[in-house]
Image (cartoon, grey):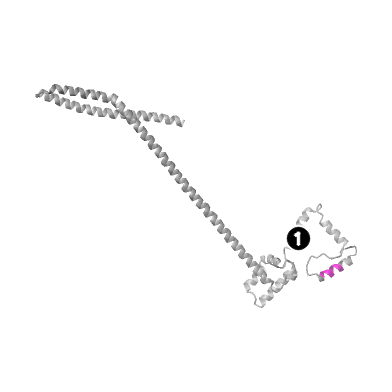
């Protein structure tokens, strides 16, 4: 009910304040001036910044116990300490720590009717329960993080092993291919080396040996001349063998140099 009579509005407010156990109630009769002021202060278009701060302040106030509830809590706490129901350490904690206000509001919901002489014990148990839950949550989170790190480490180790094995397999494969290529090149060098040796030194050596054998047939009789001739053919055969061996080494060396030069030229061409 709205009225322009401030006396009636004040009487209604005092009457209901004495009978109500909750703070912040709205009386059944209020003055028109007060109602107009409330409407003006709550106008969202004219005072937006004020409304935002007022809303935050109201929310904060609703989440904190009022002075009357705090006085009752402190009184019950002092009485419990005076009768040695709680220790000094617990008493100081419940008297000074800021977390007590949050637990007190959670238990009483700001209602005086929910408050009693043992509320401080409920507050202490609530704080301990929250602390234990937070500790368990942190331990569980730490274990999960540790397990995740171990899983990541094991995965990295496994990937490292697989990578190392892959690298070893590739190295072995490359080495095998290089060995095959080298073996193929050696076979080609030997084949061409014998061919060049046959053309350059083999045929002349064969002709020379045949000629020496023909010359030996002229020294079939027994005489000093035949002895000197046979000795000469033996020396000539030995010299021919040495020359053939040197010629063979020279032929193989030239063939190897040729293939090496050709390989270097191909490698340089592929690199470019």
- Counting from the top left corner in percent of width and height, residue 54 is at 77, 58
Residue at 89% x, 65% y is 6
Relative to residue 68, is residue 121 drawn left or right?
left
The single residue placed furthest to the right in the displayed view is: 5
Is 116 drawn above or below residue 102 in the view shown?
A: below
Residue at 60% x, 61% y is 137
Q: Quadrant of residue 60?
A: bottom right
- Counting from the top left corner in percent of width and height, residue 201 is at 27, 25
The single residue placed furthest to the bottom in the displayed view is: 83
Quadrant location, the N terminus: bottom right
Total number of numbered discs in the rendering: 1
Relative to residue 40, is residue 204 drawn left or right?
left
**Residue 14 is inside the magenta segment:** yes
What secondary structure is found at the residue carrying circle 1? helix
- Counting from the top left corner in percent of width and height, residue 27 is at 84, 65
Q: Nearer the viewer, residue 156 or 43?
A: 156
Q: Is the magenta stretch mostly helix, strand or loop?
A: helix
Q: Give the range drawn in magenta.
A: 11-17
Q: In which quarter of the image is residue 255?
A: top left
Is 34 drawn above or below residue 153 in the view shown?
A: below
Is 161 drawn above or below residue 26 in the view shown?
A: above
Q: Which of 28 and 102 is in front in this view?
A: 28
**Residue 73 is inside the magenta segment:** no
User: Which residue is under mark 1?
Assistant: 58
Relative to residue 169, is residue 191 drawn left or right?
left
Residue at 14% x, 24% y is 229
- Counting from the top left corner in percent of width and height, residue 232 is at 16, 25
Q: Nearer the viewer, residue 158 or 137?
A: 158
Q: In which quarter of the image is residue 82?
A: bottom right
């Amino acid at each position: 009910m709205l009225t322009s009579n401030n006396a009636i509005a004040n009487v209604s407010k005092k009457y209901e304040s004495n009978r109500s156990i909750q703070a912040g109630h709205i009386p059944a009769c209020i003055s028109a001036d007060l109602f107009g002021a409330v409407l003006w202060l709550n106008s969202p278009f004219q005072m937006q910044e004020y409304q935002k701060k007022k809303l935050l302040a109201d929310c904060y106030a609703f989440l904190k116990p009022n002075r009357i509830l705090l006085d009752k809590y402190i009184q019950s706490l002092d009485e419990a300490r005076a009768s040695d129901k709680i220790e000094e350490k617990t008493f100081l904690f419940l008297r000074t720590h800021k977390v007590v206000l949050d637990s007190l509001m959670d238990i009483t919901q700001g209602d005086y009717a929910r408050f009693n002489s043992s509320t401080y014990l409920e507050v202490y148990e609530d704080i301990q329960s929250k602390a234990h839950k937070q500790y368990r949550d942190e331990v569980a989170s730490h274990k999960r993080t540790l397990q995740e790190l171990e899983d990541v480490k094991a995965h990295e180790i496994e990937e490292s092993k697989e990578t190392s094995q892959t690298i070893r397999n590739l190295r072995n494969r490359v080495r095998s291919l290089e060995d095959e290529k080298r073996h193929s090149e050696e076979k080609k060098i030997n084949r061409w080396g014998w061919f060049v040796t046959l053309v350059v030194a083999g045929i002349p050596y064969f002709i020379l040996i045949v000629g020496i054998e023909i010359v030996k047939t002229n020294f079939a009789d027994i005489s000093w001349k035949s002895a000197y001739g046979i000795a000469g053919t033996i020396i000539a055969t030995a010299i021919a063998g040495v020359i053939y061996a040197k010629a063979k080494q020279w032929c193989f060396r030239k063939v190897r140099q040729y293939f090496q030069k050709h390989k270097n030229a191909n490698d340089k061409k592929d690199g470019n």
